Amino acid sequence: MDIIKKYFNKLNEKQLEQFKSLDVLYCEWNEKINVISRKDIDSLYEKHILHSLAITRVISFKPQTKILDVGTGGGFPGIPLAIFFPECKFTLVDSIGKKIQVVQSIAQVLGLTNVTAMQIRAEQLKEHFDFVVSRAVAPSEQLVSWTSSLISLHHFHQIPNGWFFLKGGNLQEELDAVKRKYKIYRIGNYFEEPFFEEKSVVYIRGKK
């Protein structure tokens, strides 16, 4: 939890309590369902929560922004972002029911009324969103293909609607295949821990 306070010193008491509660909640669920790898559960705040919050270094979502988290797994990056942006609306989807059960339970315990979690494939959704986020679920080209029809054409941020992906390693070839404008933000520029040295937030513009 200290690592969250280190980089985010303006969180209110409710947010601090919600972030603090994640440790116990994920440890409890991990005993029943392998939501987070056993070797990573001790690094929950660094490798999962802070990693998810790297997106906040690139964009500050305005109130009422609608965000879709594709392949959310146990709720990353969606749950940490929903705590950070309580006035935004988050839809977290995954095709695996057990993982969505975890997300729904955690959101309920934390009182995250801005989170909707569903067992559904992204391409089956009919709703429109301002931004789509995801963490290393699939190649960027595939994620964009699945969700391009879900991006709203009405922009109200300085950054046009589109995608924010949390990725690692060399991304040049993968992103060139997308054939859209993109920008890479190195997370190591924001967080000093060695884990983030080769991690990036990738922004892909929705409108070609």
Image (cartoon, grey):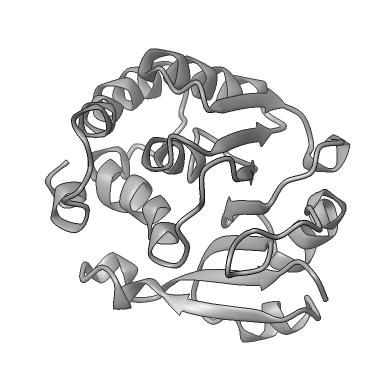
Residue 38 percent coordinates (x, y): 34, 37
Q: Is residue 62 above or below residue 156?
A: above
Residue 49 percent coordinates (x, y): 34, 45
* Quarter of the figure with the C terminus: bottom right
Residue 159 percent coordinates (x, y): 60, 69
Q: Nearer the viewer, residue 181 or 24?
A: 181
Residue 191 percent coordinates (x, y): 26, 68
Task: Specify whether 104 is left or right of 49.
Answer: right
Task: Specify whether 156 is left or right of 57.
Answer: right
Q: Give the residue displayed 58% in from the left and 35% down from the top.
A: 89
Q: Give the residue displayed 83% in from the left and 57% down from the top.
A: 148
Q: Give the residue displayed 48% in from the left and 46% down from the top.
A: 77
Tell me which corner region of the image, top left, top right, bottom left or bottom right, holds residue 41.
Answer: top left
Q: Nearer the viewer, residue 27 or 190?
A: 190
Task: Specify whether 6 is left or right of 37.
Answer: left
Q: Nearer the viewer, residue 200 or 158?
A: 158
